[in-house]
Every structure is written in structure tokens, then in C-alpha cells.
Image (cartoon, rainbow, N blue to C red):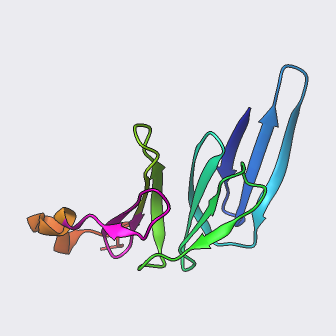
């Protein structure tokens, strides 16, 4: 079984364990990591300034996925259909389905309070 953890040290670590042992292996180092999500062998990492990285083999190999925004502060993998989601700053939400192009979920922009949003929260 695998679990993925991101740290303030800009490292994503894959933790492998079974009934007999546990091993922590750095799998994505030197990248300004902010968030990680995994579902089976699929892993997505969001970064500050470098967009998103995807792995389809439990973090053994990584590919950078071009996203319209570079600062990604939340990621998720949809359990129903495997769609990949990325929340960015400025506040936008994108989805990637079936390995095609990222598509913005524009309804988020219609919420009246959006001018006051930020992630992480602004100091004021």
C-alpha cells in the first residue's frame, strides 16, 4: 500500500508499507510542493510557481502537466470518474478528464464574493 506526503522541505515522499515493513522514499524533490492527492497508481502534486506534476505509476515517473496558472494550492482526484482537479491562486478551478486539456470550471467566477478570495489568505 502507498501513501503520499508533501513537506515544507519541497519533497514528496511515498510511504510504502505491508504487514512486514514500512519504507519512506522521496519521489519528487526540489519542487515547491504545496499539495498532493493520490488514487491507486495516480498521483497529482500541486506546486507554488511550477503548476502540477502527474504520475501514473505511484510516483516512480513524473510528468509536468501544463496548466493555465502556476500557483496550485489544492488538488483532488474524483472517485467517480478519475477526473483531476486543481485549485489555483488567483482563485480558479480546473479539471482534467481522460488526459485531455485542462478546462476551467468557470461557474466559480460567477460567485459575487470572488473578488475577496485568496489562497493562502492574504494578511489583511
- Residue pictured at 70% horizontal, 65% vertical: 62
Callout count: 0
Q: Quadrant of the N terminus?
A: top right
**Residue 8 left/right relative to 109:** right
**Residue 30 left/right relative to 79:** right
Q: Position of residue 39 (x, y in %)?
A: 57, 41
Which residue, as the protein is rendered here, is positioned at the far left?
Answer: 112
Above or below, 107 against 32 in this view is above
Which residue, as the protein is rendered here, is positioned at the far top?
Answer: 19
Whether the magenta-drawn stretch holds residue 37 is answered as no
Report the span colored magenta. Answer: 87-106
Q: Position of residue 35 (x, y in %)?
A: 55, 58
**Residue 75 left/right relative to 37:** left
Above or below, 38 against 90 in this view is above
Foreground residue among 54 and 19: 54
Q: Quadrant of the C terminus?
A: bottom left
Foreground residue among 112 and 55: 55
Q: Position of residue 94 (x, y in %)?
A: 36, 65
Above or below, 24 against 88 in this view is above
Q: Position of residue 51 (x, y in %)?
A: 53, 74
Q: Quadrant of residue 64?
A: bottom right
- Residue pictured at 41% horizontal, 80% vertical: 68
Amino acid at each position: 500500500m502507498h501513501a503520499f506526503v508533501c513537506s515544507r522541505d519541497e519533497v514528496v515522499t511515498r510511504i510504502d508499507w505491508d504487514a512486514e515493513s514500512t519504507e519512506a522514499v522521496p519521489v519528487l524533490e526540489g519542487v515547491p510542493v504545496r499539495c498532493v492527492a493520490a488514487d491507486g497508481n495516480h498521483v497529482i502534486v500541486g506546486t507554488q510557481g511550477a503548476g502540477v506534476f502527474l504520475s501514473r505509476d505511484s510516483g516512480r515517473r513524473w510528468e509536468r502537466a501544463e496548466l493555465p496558472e502556476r500557483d496550485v494550492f489544492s488538488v483532488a482526484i474524483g472517485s467517480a470518474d478519475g477526473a483531476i482537479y486543481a485549485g489555483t491562486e488567483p482563485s480558479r478551478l480546473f479539471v482534467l478528464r481522460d488526459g485531455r486539456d485542462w478546462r476551467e470550471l468557470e461557474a466559480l467566477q460567477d460567485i459575487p464574493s470572488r473578488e475577496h478570495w485568496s489562497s493562502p489568505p492574504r494578511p489583511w
